[in-house]
Amino acid sequence: MRTALYPGTFDPPTLGHVDLLQRGLHLFDRIVVGVAESRAKQPLFTVAERVELFREAVRGVDSVTIVPFDSLTVTFAREHGACAILRGLRAVSDFDYEFQLAWMNRKLDASVETVFLCPNELYSFVNSSLVKEISRLGGDVSEFVPPVVAKALRERPRR
């Protein structure tokens, strides 16, 4: 069974994240979604909330496990038997950062490959930061996030 790790902050999970996960399932038998603690980013949702939001967003999708993590990505990948780290590239601007991460992860553990996938063009401009900003300013984010996430954003006090 070929397992990939799909790590990220997912604050909040978007339809782009879900799309990338579904694309990854065409290549891997199983995907572990690792929801990073990421205190440096000061997330809007707690790690437990982000895990639950992602679980709800992909309810019924087989071969997916969603768990929190707060360790090196390659260490977490090894712990879950992943042979690859799944990463998304929306635009050329993502490439430089993702390329650096891939090389560093390879240096830390050459047995874990990085696989880059592009999301559906419908989601190529969607990112969690933009979604949070639109929501904070009272905009409708329902075409960018799963319904459970749109509801959670509406219910979240604006800061």
Image (cartoon, helix red, strand yellow):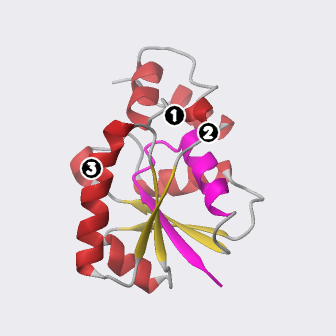
**For this view, does 131 lie left or right of residue 95?**
right
Q: Nearer the viewer, residue 97 or 74?
A: 97
Q: Whole-percent x and y of residue 150?
A: 60, 31
Label 2, label 1: how many angstroms apart (C-alpha)? 7 Å
SS class of the residue under badge 2? loop
| Sequence-first disc among 3 and 2 | 3
Label 3, label 2: how many angstroms apart (C-alpha)? 20 Å
Which residue corresponds to the image point at 49% horizontal and 51% vertical from the top-left? 50
SS class of the residue under badge 3? helix
Q: Nearer the viewer, residue 15 or 45?
A: 15
Say which residue label 1 marks: 124
Residue span colored magenta: 1-25
Name the image quarter holding the N terminus: bottom right
| Kind of residue indicated by mark 3 | Tyr
Label 3, label 1: how many angstroms apart (C-alpha)? 16 Å
Q: Do the residues labelled 2 and 1 touch (CB within 8 Å)?
A: yes
Which corner quadrant of the image does residue 76 belong to? Answer: bottom left
Which corner quadrant of the image does residue 43 belong to? Answer: top left
Q: Whole-percent x and y of residue 96?
A: 27, 47
Q: Whole-percent x and y of residue 10?
A: 45, 48
